[in-house]
Structures are given as structure tokens and as C-alpha cells.
Image (cartoon, rainbow, N blue to C red):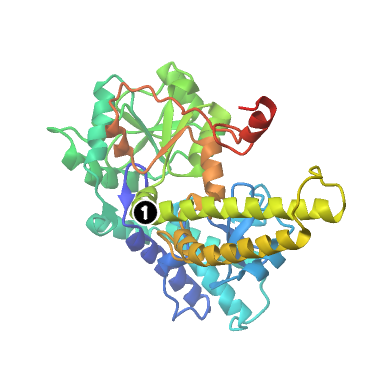
Amino acid sequence: MDYTLIHYHVMAWEERAYSYIKKRLNKAGWPVESLQFKADLVMRGLIIDTELGNIVKADRFGYVKYAFHGTTPLDYDEKKRVYRQTLVDLNTPRWKFLNTLFSLSEACMYMQLVDLIDSDVVEGVMGYGDLYNTVRQTLDEAHMEGKLKEEIINNPAEFVDLDPEIPLALLDQKYAGKKLLLITNSEWSYAAPMLAYAFDQFLPGKMTWKDLFDISIVAARKPDFFSLRLPAFEVVDDDGLLREHSGSLKTGKVYVGGNAKLVEESLGITGEDILYVGDHIFADVNVSKSIQRWRTALIIRELEGDIAAAFEFEDREEELGEMMVEKERLEADFSRLRLRAQRIKNDYSTDPSAQETVEDLDKRMMQLRQSLVELDGRISPIAIESSRLNNPNWGLLMRTGKDKSHLARQIERYADIYMSRVSDFLYHTPFVYLRSHRGSLPHDLASPITHIHERVTGD
């Protein structure tokens, strides 16, 4: 439900979540009165290094490309020294992946508390791993207390970013013959009023969100929902009164708990017939695909900002691309001259009739080197600008420099499709068959390896 069917004003939500962490830490004696939530410090897809107190952005292979220690960025030399022989491995407890927008407040607080620990402002010795656990536990306790959600229920207009096209997109699917399922970890007491606010005013006639979904499951306990045979209870009134349930899930009912296998059995379908849509890379798309083989769609709301920034930068990016092509050409010319000089120096030249001397080649290489230096001077500011699109510290969500980010790799691995919001389904009819594009390979078309073909065939 959250950040999938209902979108929030991220700053409003995370500032309030941050304030609850801060309040609890202050009560526990932490000197956090002057700290403020800073949205640009963090983004989804970053990874906390609990061993060193750093927060990093890695590429698809796990190489760290950007890093902060606390709130201070590591320069290139320091980052290289620290992570030269280290790859990010999300399967080890050292690394904590920020895979939802709900991670932003705790990550910001963690970075700021690292500064406090390093400055000896906090009494006692605490490791960076213990610090992470403290922040995580503090946020969990704040959520369990329920005051933040109570604020949102009482004033949804301040926190909810309404999208009237989401109900329309789901109505298209419903009347095209699809079964609509709601599976959320939110409790009935939160899900019911929030869905009523976000959906009912945009549905026709007297239809409510409960009429829109064929089966609704709240307090689903994902990811256990996909791996365990948890029991289901029927919600029988608006106060959330529960009744024990056995057998198949019934159309038009709302349940607490249940499990993925029960959903399949109730609908008489298998995983390949279900498209499960969620915003959590692990609790939604990873587990549902790995265990149940459900088709998966990931919601990435930040994608809209990334696309807008990239579109605005398009002309500069084209200019940068042209300069990089020229740089590669000059580097190739320089390398060829260097190789010819090497062959002459070591007396194994394959062209005995060549009249060039090493001195001639050195002179030409000096000219090329100067051209490269001048070109790098033009490339550098545009490349830096490109790396900071949409976030001055981390750049685009799904890129790390020119390569794909670690988050992008996770998305490729587990999500069949991704989009910025559910209403993006409106760009297609509900009868569309989504096919993957033909994947590219390094030797396709004009890649450098095609020169092998040219050398062999003479084409």
C-alpha cells in the first residue's frame, strides 16, 4: 500500500519520522537537539557500511564509487584507499541496504550521529554497528508507538500525495477481467482510513476501495507471507473485529494474515499468472519472485525526478558523449604511436620500410597528449555536473557515474518491470502483452570487437 497505492510527500513524512527518532534519542540522553533532517544527504539505494561508519553508493559489481564518512564525503584517494580491496556484499551483515523511501530518516540520523561519536560528544564507546542498531531500534519503537501514523490519519492532506489516476488504472484492469489483490503489511486501523482517503473520492458512485479489490489482506507480515503458512482471519466490521477463517479466501472480503499459497489456491492460479506490484526490493519483489515465482513490478517514485533531470541535461549529455568519442579516438591514436615507438626501440617492427624515428613519434605523442589535456579540461566540468543530477551528493538513483548502480542491478535481477507509479499502467491498455527488449551484448553493432570481423573478412 505505502508508496505503491498511496504516495506520500517524502519530505513531510521523513521529517516527522526523523523528529520522532530525535525525540527518543534526546530522551535517552543523546545530544541531538541541534540536528536537522537533510534530504540531500541520503537517497534510496545507498548502503550503510556499519564497520566503518560510512554510507556508500556502489556500482552493479559492488565497487564503491562514492562514499561519505558521517556527513563528510571521502575524496577519491581516501575512498580508493579504504575500499580498494572491498566489494559490497548485501548477503553479509556489514552492509545495510537502504531499499525504501522509509529508510531516509534513519540514514540521515545515522550519518549525523557518526559525526557526534567521532567528535567524542557522545560519552562511552560505541561501535558503528551498534550505532546503526540503536537508530534502527529507535525508529521501530517510534512506529510501534503509533503516534506518527495517528498524525497522518488525522491530517492525511499534509502527508499524502494524491493520484486520482491510480484508481482509474485499477478500474481499467478490473473491468478488463483481472482480479485485483491488496496485500499490505499495514494494520487495518491504518490501512482502512488511508485507502478511503486516497481512493474513495475518485471511485464511481458509491464504490469504495473494498469494492475495488477482489481480495484484501492487511497485516500480511511480508516477507513471511510468501514463505510460511500463516493463518487468515476475516475482518468483519469497521472496528477491525476478527473472525477465524478456514478454506478459500472469498471475493469482496478483507483478511488479516494469510499466505501467498492460500491466495493461489483461492484463485485457482499459479505464480506466473500474478503480477505483484510493490516498492520494497526485498519484502516485495525479491521474495515473491524467488519463492512463489510471481511476476513482479517495482514502484520507484524517484524515477520521475531522475527522468526530468536527465531530459533537461540532454543537450549537455550529448555534448559530453561527443567529447568522449573524441577522447577515445585521441587515446587510440596515442596508443598506436606508442606501440610503434616500442617496436622500433626493441627492433621488432613489422614494417621495416617505415621511415619514422622514435623522436618523430615522441613529438607527435606530445601533441596528442596536449590535445587530451585540453579536452579533459572541457570534459571535467560537464562530467561532474552529470554525476550530480537530481542529487548534489549522489546523482541519479540508478546510475553510479556512467555505470548502473547497485540498486539498478537488484532491480534488473528481481523485477520483471518497473515504473514510477501504478497509474503508469494507463500508458498501455489493460490488454497489452509486455515483452522484454532484445538484450545488448558488448560485440553487437559498432562495438570495438567488430574490428575483429573487419580484420578477418576484410569488410
| Residue drawn at point x = 25 percent, y = 59 percent | 158
Q: Quadrant of the C terminus?
A: top right
Q: Give residue 50's position: percent from left, percent from top.
A: 64, 62
Q: Give residue 76's position: percent from left, percent from top.
A: 62, 68
The correct choice, above or below, for 44 with respect to 297 in the image is below
Residue 129 placement, left or right of 3: right
- Which amino acid, by three-letter code, is at mark 1? Asp
User: Of all residues shown, which one is farthest toward the left?
Assistant: 205
Q: Quadrant of the N terminus?
A: top left
Can residue 286 be seen at all in this image of the molecule? Answer: no
| Residue drawn at point x = 62 percent, y = 64 percent | 367
**Residue 273 found in image quarter:** top left
Question: How busy is the neighbourhood of tag 1: few (under 14 within 10 Å), some, or many (20 plus)?
Answer: few
Residue at mark 1: 315
| Residue drawn at point x = 76 percent, y = 48 percent | 354
The correct choice, above or below, for 68 with respect to 220 in the image is below
Decide which of 134, 444 is in the foreground and name it.
444
- Element on which disc 1 rests: helix
**Residue 243 found in image quarter:** top left
The correct choice, above or below, for 34 with respect to 357 in the image is below
| Residue drawn at point x = 49 percent, y = 61 percent | 383
Q: How many marks?
A: 1
Q: Give residue 204's position: percent from left, percent from top.
A: 14, 33
Decide which of 331, 149 is in the foreground and name it.
331
Residue 417 placement, left or right of 292: left
User: Of all residues shown, which one is farthest toward the top?
Assistant: 268
Decide which of 366, 92 is in the foreground and name it.
366
Can residue 386 be seen at all in this image of the molecule? Answer: yes
